[in-house]
Amino acid sequence: MPGPKDLDPSSSPRAMIGAELRHAREKAGLSQTELGEPLFVSGSFIGQLEAGTRRLHLEYAVQIDQILKTDGFFERNCRALARSKYPDHFAEAAEAEAIASGIREYSTLLIPGLLQTEQYAEAVFRAYAPTAPDTEIASLVAARLERARLIDDPTTPLLWTVLDEAVLRRRVGGGLVMAKALQHLAALARVHRIIVQVLPFRAGAHASMHGSLKLMEFEDAPPLSFVDGPNMGKLLDDPATVARHALTFNLLQASALSLQDSLALIESVAEDYEHGEQRPRA
């Protein structure tokens, strides 16, 4: 009988590899726990790999091929998946995000990537890499816009964003860029595609003074959280940690403005940016 077919990494790669892993494991007569033992990981971790919510790393792929006798299938496809369009520190989170049923995110300084306009994203990447060639910036922007197509679906994932007021006030790319970026946010909220709240400066100290936070939920796998910093990020699956992060987000929601007041503030600030750019100079 022929072995499994190598996968196309451009089409739901982790979900397909996960399905193949489940098939190969069950064919070998092993439980998730039994497969996890020689890898020194839990059965739930194997379940996350099979559900596509975690990336299969090369060290595990090589061992799985040996255990399940899959003739290098998982190693080959793992190497193909490593060629991600996203930075290394974010690649695994981006892949999980693509299959999440719900995403909750608190952002301290920037409009979240899924909700950015092209001009806003370009200004962000140019600030990160002021000497990078235009082609490199264009490639990064294209990847971000492709990722944002996730919200083209009218209902999934459920996207709930809490923005610090600093996100609205920090002028990224100039007044007109900010006006269009905030108008885009408001439009998505008005058609009920996203839920957005603003955490105002007057809220004072809050539950996530340490920084931004992303939570992802899945139909058939435990939730994950993602925390990041300059050129680094970590996807977390420890239940206690994820539960703590979920509580943090709930507290942020409670401290933020109502949906109606948040939308009104976003539109008001957008109008200020737009009119400010249109005023004639003395």
Image (tube, helix red, strand yellow):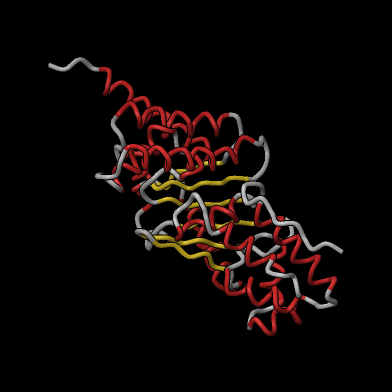
Q: Report the residue at 33% width, 26% height from top.
A: 176
Q: State whether residue 171 appears in this view.
A: yes
Q: Position of residue 248 (x, y in %)?
A: 50, 62
Residue 207 sits in quarter: bottom left
- The N terminus: image quadrant: bottom right
**Position in image of residue 116 (x %, y %):** 45, 38
Q: Which one is nearer the viewer's eye here, 72 or 265?
A: 72
Residue 116 drawn above or below residue 29: above
Does residue 207 appear in the picture of this structure?
no
Residue 269 left/right relative to 115: left
- Foreground pick, 109 / 29: 29
Q: Quadrant of residue 46?
A: bottom right
Answer with left or right where residue 253 lies relative to residue 164.
right
Query: Position of 96 compared to 173: left or right?
Result: right
Q: Where is residue 227? Give x, y as percent.
A: 46, 62
**Relative to 31, is 56 on the left or the right?**
left
Q: In this view, does 141 lie above or below 80?
A: above
Q: Give the image quarter of residue 220.
A: bottom right
Residue at image location 29% in from the left, 44% down from the top: 132
Number of numbered discs = 0
Q: Which residue is drawn at 66% across and 72% down?
A: 45
Q: Where is residue 22 in the image (x, y as percent from the top left)?
A: 78, 66
Q: In which quarter of the image is the C terminus?
A: top left
